[in-house]
Image: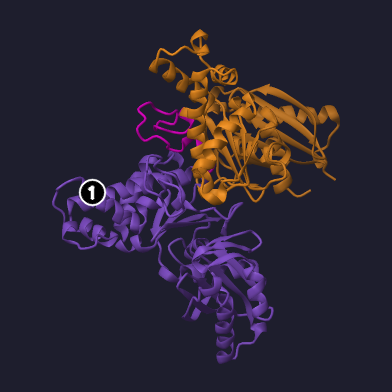
Chain colours: A orange, B purple
Amino acid sequence: MKPYIFGVDLGGTTVKIGLFENEELLDKWEIPTRTEENGKYILGDIADSILLQMQKRGISPGEIRGVGIDVPGAVLEDGTVNRCVNLGWGVVRAHEELNRLLNGIPVEVANDANAAALGEMWKGGGKGYSNVVMVTLGTGVGGGVIINGKIFSGAFGASGELGHMLVNPDETVLCGCGKKGHLEQYTSANGVARLAKKHLEASDEDSCLRREENVTSKAVCDGAKAGDKMCIEIMEEFGSILGRGLALVSCVVDPEIYVIGGGMSKAGPMVIDYVQKYYVEAAFHASTSTRFALAELGNDAGMYGCVKMVQDKIPE
Amino acid sequence: MKPYIFGVDLGGTTVKIGLFENEELLDKWEIPTRTEENGKYILGDIADSILLQMQKRGISPGEIRGVGIDVPGAVLEDGTVNRCVNLGWGVVRAHEELNRLLNGIPVEVANDANAAALGEMWKGGGKGYSNVVMVTLGTGVGGGVIINGKIFSGAFGASGELGHMLVNPDETVLCGCGKKGHLEQYTSANGVARLAKKHLEASDEDSCLRREENVTSKAVCDGAKAGDKMCIEIMEEFGSILGRGLALVSCVVDPEIYVIGGGMSKAGPMVIDYVQKYYVEAAFHASTSTRFALAELGNDAGMYGCVKMVQDKIPE
């Protein structure tokens, strides 16, 4: 019997580690991500933290089914990480290296957005479904595509890169990726703040946003809830761009459910209302009844997805 | 040993039937599609044609691994056909009915565009790849998504409905599906003819198209090859709309290769050149080197895909 699995969500600032026993989260903790010297200490720090936890709890390597880890970058089919700017990594065979540092405990690697999607399918907003698309509306827009219950990474690890769908060929401002007119420029938390600034500049209309020192997506959502006209208009614009974007996604993979996470999703069901209205209008007739749900696992989604990935890929 | 498989491509006018022996096409023939009385005779005609062929060749039911059939409509995960307007069908459990008519020979059903994609992956333009998106530029625009070597139909059978991606929210003319601004309104063979008419009306510029009684996509392709300025402009417009559309597809499923088929593909590699140029410009950086190929199996693609589907789903 191997009742234990570690799930490791490796971010640019912190590493979240969870210890699961028979599918239940037993404990979770964080360590800092040391990105200095091209992130050469990161995997060693993670291994040390896991080994220490095992020692504390008297868990032997033979009781561990595996370690799942996700990274903020492209992961190829064989588990090789292909560039993580936020970690300072180039091509890193993270699964092999971590496996060696953990004295042979099996390791599986995934992209962070994909892992979050898998986690939400397993224990979160997408529970009960096996064809799920998750959209994370945070600093940028991330996405994960789950096909028949498994992460689908694509040929170049770019499956689910919904934030970089070209939705406005006329855009002049650059997206973080270096191209222009991408979905995340309008529908991420930052994107909504950007839409708000445009609306404020375009007219003299009064709005609660004019009393904010720094206009955030949260202020826009709060304002829309309170009935502020300009905030509602901004949310309509956000909803139309994302709703139409997801209608495109349905023409490609036609999922059972969209799970919406990230900072924007904290505004609650209202966000779904704005998006779904335009989705239904734009979607091909067969796909108009696709479900929408909010993410439920917050920052733990990646960690959960990593554990599910170990369950799927490593025998008991 | 069961060396024989029948592949049946059921279209709105004719049914193409192929008999395969150990992966090789032994014979193919066509029968008319009798759509009268809500298409109630169609499956019986197909069964009769297969049984007759078996009798002629002295093939016993025990030597047949299965029959694969594709239909021009949505097919659910369990093989139920959910509306085929062109056949007059509502909900038809085609696999069960054909299985009964064939005295128990196993039957598998797929959507026609998906079957064509699988066929092209198996023996055509996508040979050697397992993550393939096929785009068929015919009367409309069809598509099929192959994930890990298998057809992926989606939750509502709408996976690969690339022709109904909303690419122009400002369009006023209706698409065949009843909505507006869809990819097939600009990039199908009919769509290209429509673009041509718009170009002709928009200026007095001379063009070889003005000497055509009926402007077709073939005339546009021929003109572009001959250096006609307006035809080249039309092809650029076609290429930009389709190239950007496929860049969106790559953000979702990031395939290894796009296979382009249908009437438009008869113009040859030029079509790929026009599309790929805009694809590379619009695609997320990780996906700019996705391959493009022309379909190779023509009207036989669906039949081949049906045979491959039987191989995948029915044990030897």
**In this orientation, which residue lies closer to the viewer: B2 or B80?**
B80
In the picture provided, is A218 more to the left or to the right than B237? right
**In this orientation, which residue lies closer to the viewer: A153 or B267?**
B267
- Answer above or below: position of A299 versus B281: above
Note whether residue A100 is visible: no
Q: Residue A122, image x and y in percent?
A: 72, 41
The quadrant the N terminus of chain A occupies is top right
Q: Residue at x 72, y 45 (%)?
A: A128
Q: Residue A193, image x and y in percent?
A: 49, 20
> Dot 1, how many residues are within 10 Å of its Cα: few (below 14), some (14-19), or many (20+)?
some
**Please, what is the three-letter code of the amino acid marked with disc 1?**
His
Note whether residue A314 is visible: yes
Residue A175 lies in the magenta-colored region: yes
Q: Residue at x 46, y 23 (%)?
A: A195
Residue A161 lies in the magenta-colored region: yes
Q: Give the main secondary structure, helix, strand or loop, of the magenta stretch.
A: loop
- Answer above or below: position of B283 versus A220: below
- Answer above or below: position of B257 versus B123: above
The residue segment tinted magenta is A159-185
Corner quadrant of residue B67: bottom right
- Answer above or below: position of B276 versus A271: below
Say which residue label 1 marks: B199
**In this orientation, which residue lies closer to the viewer: A78 or A142?**
A142
Total numbered labels placed on residues in the image: 1
In the picture provided, is A6 more to the left or to the right than A247? right
Q: Chain of mark 1?
A: B
Q: Residue A4, image x and y in percent?
A: 80, 38
